[in-house]
Image (cartoon, rainbow, N blue to C red):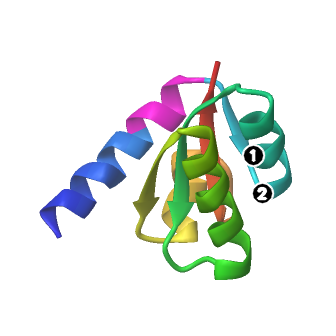
Amino acid sequence: KKEQQMAQEKAYLELSSKKIVVGAKQLRKALNSGLARKVYLAQNADPAITEPIEALCQLKSVEYAWVKSMTDLGHACGIEVGAAAAAAID
């Protein structure tokens, strides 16, 4: 549980201080073009959205981490709605 909280805090820091992309479609583009540095996935998001992104991260050797909820991930990104996936980009 403590490890998950640390990942959550790191997500907030990284996503609030860097260029980011939010959403599955934009995230896939960033992964395929080599721009994504670290990906964050919401644990309560639809697996049909997160599983292909997780697989693409593994394929592209991009680090990824899980955060507690879509709401938390959305807040970390500075948006008013939940987000299933987000990434810090170059």
Boundaries of the magenta span = 13-18
The overriding secondary structure of the stretch rendered in magenta is helix
Mark 1 packing: few (<14 Cα in 10 Å), some, or many (20+)?
many
Mark 2 packing: few (<14 Cα in 10 Å), some, or many (20+)?
some
Q: Is residue 86 left or right of residue 4?
A: right
Q: Residue at x 54, y 39 (%)?
A: 62
Instruction: Please say whether residue 28 is one of the residues in the magenta stretch.
Output: no
Q: Quadrant of residue 14?
A: top left
Amino acid carrying mark 1 in the image = Leu
Marks 1,2: beta carbons within 8 A = yes
Q: Which residue is mark 2?
A: 24
Label 1: state its secondary structure: helix
Residues under labels 1 and 2: Cα distance?
A: 5 Å
Q: Residue furthest left?
A: 2
Is 26 placed above or below 42 here?
above
Amino acid carrying mark 2 in the image = Ala
Q: Residue at x 64, y 68 (%)?
A: 50
Residue 65 placed where, x, y %? 42, 53
Residue 15 placed where, x, y %? 52, 36
Q: Residue at x 53, y 80 (%)?
A: 44
Quadrant for the C terminus in the image: top right
Q: Which residue is mark 1?
A: 27
